[in-house]
Amino acid sequence: MKDRSKLTTEKSNQSTVDIDRLSTLKIVELINQQDALVVKAAAGQKRQVAKAIDIVTEAFNVGGRLFYVGAGTSGRLGVLDASECPPTFGVRPAMVQGVIAGGKRALVRSIEGAEDSKQAGRDALIKRKIKSVDVVMGIAACGITPFVHGAIQYARSKGCKTIFLTCAPQAKKSINTDVIINPVVGPEVITGSTRMKAGTVTKLVLNTITTAAMIKTGKVYGNLMVDLRATNRKLQDRAERILISVTGRPKASAKRLLKKANGRVKAAIVMHFRKVDLPEAIKILKECGQSLRGAIKEKCLDN
């Protein structure tokens, strides 16, 4: 699309044309009013998001990976979501990866020109040796970022499932992916500043995709992150509280059990209910496809 002015993400928001004349409080209220539109826009794409989750879950179940590809704010949000998966769900860093135009430097400093090359997008995925079992999700608020489209085209050529997230409905006709997620949040408070509403809705969607996929692959028991590793004081405390909640053990006992499990909460729970040591607990979980419910069903009721 040559005329970017027609994109929703580039249009002027008529509700904020006089924002520079307002008091500080009125500016805050106006931004809050616009932000309130974001959740509704995300909810309107629930079916598309669910399809994306099923694709990602299927990939995870066969050893595939999820790659987020974006530039600027979109790229940073992909990297952010990917980086939060290992500490939250105990997965390998390689399982969910963020690819940003311009590389690591672009995380802390704007490198806007990096997004203009389709070949750079292809090269980024070639470097990561993507396979057909992987999923590549393009993120571009405007929907037309060359770096992202180059990556998507390459991913399709390798047989990967592909997903695209854009806030511009006008761009949909130029997108060829298995799923298109298109939450339309409307023009930004500051014209073209997609770090605002578009960025917020992107964060919501990415959170939903990875969280739901992790739930469906057994990384969550009830609403507890049982696959976390107790690698710092905060996570140690959370792990102990999870053990207390699930097993009913007193705090001191839960702490000792967690130590025996080398900080592995899920394994510790299996050790408690199946009365086994750590190696046996790990074996049981592997046999049950990492499902905690399946691993403990012989010794405890469904919680």
Image (cartoon, helix red, strand yellow):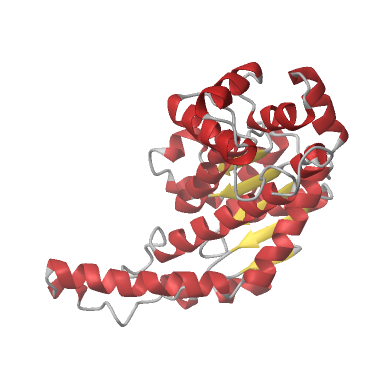
* Observer able to see residue 227: yes
Residue at 38% from the left image edge and 39% from the top image edge: 109
Q: Position of residue 155 (x, y in %)?
A: 75, 49
Q: Is residue 66 above or below residue 284?
A: below
Between 302 and 1, the residue placed more toward the observer is 302
Residue 160 falls left or right of residue 181: right
Residue at far bottom of view: 14
Q: Position of residue 196 (x, y in %)?
A: 38, 61
Q: For residue 131, which quarter of the picture?
A: top right
Q: Position of residue 79 (x, y in %)?
A: 53, 42
* Observer able to see residue 175: no
Between 276 and 147, the residue placed more toward the observer is 276
Residue 30 falls left or right of residue 202: left
Residue 277 falls left or right of residue 245: right
Residue at 39% from the left image edge and 44% from the top image edge: 110
Q: Quadrant of the N terminus?
A: bottom right
Q: For residue 200, which quarter of the picture?
A: bottom left
Q: Is residue 141 above or below residue 291?
A: below
Between 42 and 133, the residue placed more toward the observer is 42
Q: Position of residue 194 (x, y in %)?
A: 42, 62
Number of labels in the image equals 0
Q: For residue 140, which quarter of the picture?
A: bottom right
Q: Is residue 34 above or below residue 252?
A: below
